[in-house]
Amino acid sequence: MRVPLSWLREYVSLPADWPVLVERLSRAGLEVTAVYAYGLPLPPGLPAPQAPLVWERDQIVIARILRIARHPNADKLKLVTVDYGAAEPKTVVTGAPNIEVGQSGQTVVLGLQGCRYFSMDKEGRKSITTLEPRSLRGIMNDAMCMSEFELGLSDDHEGIILLDGEDVPPPGTPAADVLADIVLEIDVLPNMARCLGLLGLAREVAALTGAPLRLPEPSYQVSSQPLSRHVRVTIEDPALCSRYLAAVIRDVAIGPSPYWMQHRLRLAGMRPINNVVDITNYVMLEYGQPLHAFDYDVLCQRAADQIPSIVIRSARPGEMLTTLDGQHRQLTAETLVIADTAGPIALAGVMGGQQTEVSPQTRNLLLEAAAFDLTSIRRTARHFNLFSEASTRFSRGVSPVQVLPAAQRALELFQRLARGRVVAELVDVFPHPPEPQLVNLPRREIGRLLGCTLPDESVERILRALDFGVQATPDGWQVLVPPSRLDIQCGEADLIEEIARIYGYDRLPERLLPLELPPPHPQRDLDLEEQVRDLLVAMGLQEVITYALTSPEAEARLYPSPRYAPALDYVRLLNPMSPERAVLRQTLLPGLFAVLQHNREHADSLALFELGFVYLPQAGAELPAEPRRLAIVLAGRRRPPAWDDPPHAPIPAHDFFDLKGILETLLAELHLPTVRFEATSEVPWLHPKRAARIESGSACLGTCGELHPRVAEHWQLPRGVWVAELDLETMLAMVPERFAYRPISPFPPAKRDIAVVVPADLPAERVAQEIRTAGTPLLVRLELFDLYTGPGLPPGTKSLAFALTYQAVDRTLSDKEVTRWHEKIEGRLRHVLGAKIRGKDLA
């Protein structure tokens, strides 16, 4: 919300040092996200998106036009003679289209020689220029009548500024005293919706600073004819519309708003249209109460020249409405509409209808002021993707008590600025006025929640400044909540929050909690999950977090032929924001692949992991199963380049053994029982010849391998992407509560090698398993260091060479003892696997 300080100053006096107010508002829950200056300098340290153009007081001044004559050498130029407070008038050359030859008396803004102003360069870019004397078609010109664009007030450069109204400043007045302003951009949170109007914000400022609050007191004259003869109003469901007020204004003169109103609307971020629309927008910004004006004569035509009957109801099947933006909209039963006997005329609280909009030919108006159900308005705005200033306020909650004062303020402005006649007796349908809300506020509860006591006078001052009624009681206060405070739902806790917010959180004393901290309760499952993260990060991987929402099409791309992907049952969203976020995921891989695809152009080495939930529907159950999964992906070079790399030597890419090493290290650090990698071709997104199941005991922990080339193409990924996905629930369930450490032996180890010839299709892990079985307990280390296939071996075989380390914890092993254990291992390999020992069974 944009707040011009000059407008806010009408309702409450602001501190001379206004940047202090910026800080106090932010601390009170009204964060000032940006500060814009128009014609004034900005102190340093404020969140200013751009440097301001400062209007020099003696160079940009107010002037009054004395006469306008034709330029002798140009049809489109005029000679404007102005009084700008100097001893002699000045003649200025201008081509402004909004003044005519022969006119006089208008008040303009005059820029004199040396002033700085905005202009457009040849490339169409906005830049700052210094005004210098120059000849315009033979006449020397050293001043100019300024437009809003040139002063930086807006992008409008179609005409010069023409000031009007009753309080036009005299010639020579610095323009900075009239038009310069500071505008605060405030982030208004949903629980502070009352501050979406300047009066609500002014009340907050008054409470923060102690300054008095000045509220408008609307007054207008009414005709003697009662309004009941002009319109009838019916509310079908008070739960959807708690109050609806209608007023008729006759004989309005449609035209532009006065400049002061246009100026304020532009500073507040709204575009002036005409006096009728501008008045409704002005009151909405002032009170936070959206208003809407209908063409009353069109309503009479739709009612066949009978008294129009306004009905607030839900839309009926098949009804359509063409809204002000020209769109034809199909209404649903959940859409709240304003209707008459001929059908809908507006989307309640969101947008009016095109047929009843105000036009230049409009002479009679029906003014609407209402309070609608915030959930209904939010649903309608989201359904039609219509988010406006009005729907923003209604969807956060508009109190029905502010309907009448806002309508009265608008009627005053209609009479004053559009010369309208207000018909007597407003139609105000208010079925269920809110009951008074009384809250007991014990003094001790303030101390309990804030940790300190506050002076009684401070508590009472703050509450009264915020419009609460306060009655002292022996142990505290009885507080009457104003009906406008829809956010007070939790009684005394909400009141104490308001007191602390205005008193200042920074003023509350700091102290330690008086209670002892409770003993921590370890959560083993979460601790293990965090340990997994720490281990992977320590190995150089980076964690990513992706959306749990995906689409069936994205998961189908995990299959080489997506069209033949199995039809899975998903947990679906009833109203997804987009088709790409329509279901809950059943695997982490699509999100991880999307991150990889997005980042691979910016990094030549990627090692990523994600730990998160997947969502699997359960037959007969209301909620899905939500097991955790761990996914890892490696792509690109094994490591980044280093300064001491050999010249022109390529850095090897990630391969299966990088992924296998990460998994082995992770599982070993978690002390899982013996882990095996078994070849598999059953995982559709993995290469059928380069994939493995990860097993421990009889449990399958997951799968790993190279991404299938066709799947890589679907995701626009290069070949050589290595992927693993593990069932974290199964993996963590196998982590032992306790594990034994093996003592470090003080005795020297003995090392032997063994080369084994086995069938080519026998996994090396199977050989290693038999070596460990036979060598326990003296075999403490086993490493595969060579694989050989080729001449010298029988066909269909391979040679595996292992390094074996023997060591005892209580003695030094003799050569004879080591030889005996080594031969035991050789015998088991021959007997169980039919292996040949190179150097003994084969030459």
Image: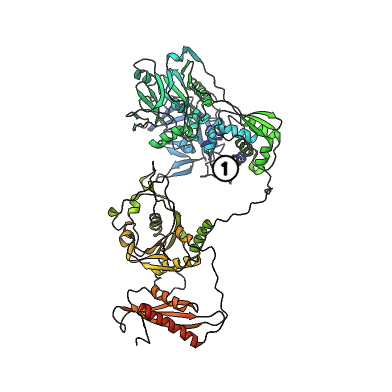
**Circle 1: residue type:** Leu
Residue 701 location, x and y as percent? 42, 62
Q: Quadrant of residue 742?
A: bottom right
Residue 603, above or below 181 = below
Extreme residue toward the top, this view: 224
- Residue 659 horizontal side relative to residue 163, left or right: left
User: Which residue is rendered at x = 42% and y = 48% of the image?
Assistant: 624
Residue 738 location, x and y as percent? 54, 65
Res 211 seen here: no
Q: Quadrant of residue 25?
A: top right
Extreme residue toward the front, this view: 831
- Residue 544 horizontal side relative to residue 521, left or right: left
Please name the residue that numbered disc 1 is placed on.
42
Q: Nearer the viewer, residue 263 or 79?
A: 263
Q: Nearer the viewer, residue 818 or 245?
A: 818
Q: Nearer the viewer, residue 335 or 559?
A: 559
How is this picture coloured?
Answer: rainbow
- Residue 601 horizontal side relative to residue 42, left or right: left
Residue 243 location, x and y as percent? 48, 24
Residue 698, above or below 3 = below
Residue 218 location, x and y as percent? 54, 21
Q: Quadrant of the C terminus?
A: bottom left
Residue 544, above or below 693 = above
Res 368 seen here: yes
